Amino acid sequence: MTGETELRVVGYIPARAFCGANPTYRPGYADILSISASDEFPIVESRSGFIFSGWNPPDEFLAKVYDDVIDHSKTITETVDYRRGLLELAAAFLRIVEQSHPSSTKTRRLLDFGCGYGSLTRMLHGRDIKCCGYDPSAARLSRASQAGVEVSDNLESVAEFGPFDLLICTDVLEHVANPREVLRYLNKNASPGALLAITVPQCEPSFMTDYFAALAREGTLSRLVNPWEHLNYFSASSLRGLLAEEGFTPVHDHGRTAFLRETCLQMGDSKRRESRVRAGLRIARTLTATSRSTQLICRTDQS
């Protein structure tokens, strides 16, 4: 992604370490992929500090991972916790859409790039928002198509549905070999001033050191580290830098307010005065925090 050729190997991860930590993987993953559980896969770091997978899986390998290795009846994207996060992001996105064009009666076109099972596409599709979803996984598209919205695994066909006023790209850039190409595709097929909701897992500079320490101690890793699926590990700064280079300006940091929302909910549930006071103090501290997240709503720089 950075174009740098001087790379440092952070470490090697055996397949059993990240596959064993993933409850959605079928036990026979090694046989399905024709590999050994002891095969190791590198994580590397560029000179500028960007961390990514040192092995670029072939398309056929990835197709087997996403369609055959993953047990789609156990995916986390169908859990209550994951869907709650999507609903919160969708609500924030729609609020900014309304603020941008409060009196507009225009029917907007929305592209959900990497729509997966179509959860967000189903939520947002309606009379005033016509949705189109793209995903390269046949297994996911099969389920997404049941939502009654346009879905495709063909980027040229998707472009014919545009240009798009609204763009969604949730938990996608970490999965693709060239995130820059994805953003360029989105910008190319966006209407002037289009809004983009984008998220990736947040991986600040120290996270990989911590994970390899855990690997040495316990022999397994969090499912966040997966050199087959998670090819890129973004920090808040590296994501914003890439977005700026490709013509997107953040207008709302959705993730930064996550703790604030949770604390407000706890405050509303608190029956004792002392609990409400403590919750209020946590809210005050959060309001003065300067940390940034990787859950953003952006506007294209096109005019």
Image (spheres, rainbow, N blue to C red):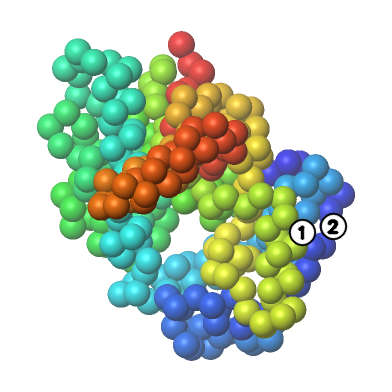
> Any mark on residue 44, and which?
1
- Front one among 85 and 131: 85
Residue type at numbered disc 2: Arg
The structure residue drawn at horizontal position 74% and vertical position 71%, both measured from the top left corner, is: 213
Mark 2 residue element:
strand
Task: Indicate the position of residue 111 as horizontal and vertical percent values.
Answer: 34, 38
Residue type at numbered disc 1: Val
- Front one among 202 and 177: 202
Q: Is residue 94 visible?
A: yes
Crowding at dot 1, Cα within 10 Å, few <14 / some 14-19 / many 20+, comes out as: many
Number of marks present in the image shown:
2
In the picture, which quadrant includes the N terminus? top right
> Any mark on residue 215, and which?
none
Residue 207 position by quadrant: bottom right
Q: Is residue 265 visible?
A: no
- Say if 233 sits above or below 257 in the image: below
Is residue 91 toward the left or the right of residue 4 in the image?
A: left
Which residue ends up furthest to the left in the rendered image? 127
* Residues at marks 2 and 1, CA–CA distance in whole angstroms: 5 Å
Residue of label 2:
8
- Say if 269 sits above or below 190 in the image: below
Task: Indicate the position of residue 64 as horizontal and vertical percent values.
Answer: 48, 73
Mark 1 residue element:
strand
- Say if 230 sits above or below 251 in the image: below
Crowding at dot 2, Cα within 10 Å, few <14 / some 14-19 / many 20+, comes out as: some
Is tag 2's residue or tag 1's residue first in the polypeptide sequence? 2
Is residue 215 toward the left or the right of residue 292 in the image?
A: right
- The reply to whether the C-beta atoms of the residues labelled 2 and 1 are less than 8 Å apart is yes
Is residue 158 toward the left or the right of residue 177 in the image?
A: left
The structure residue drawn at horizontal position 21% and vertical position 34%, both measured from the top left corner, is: 130
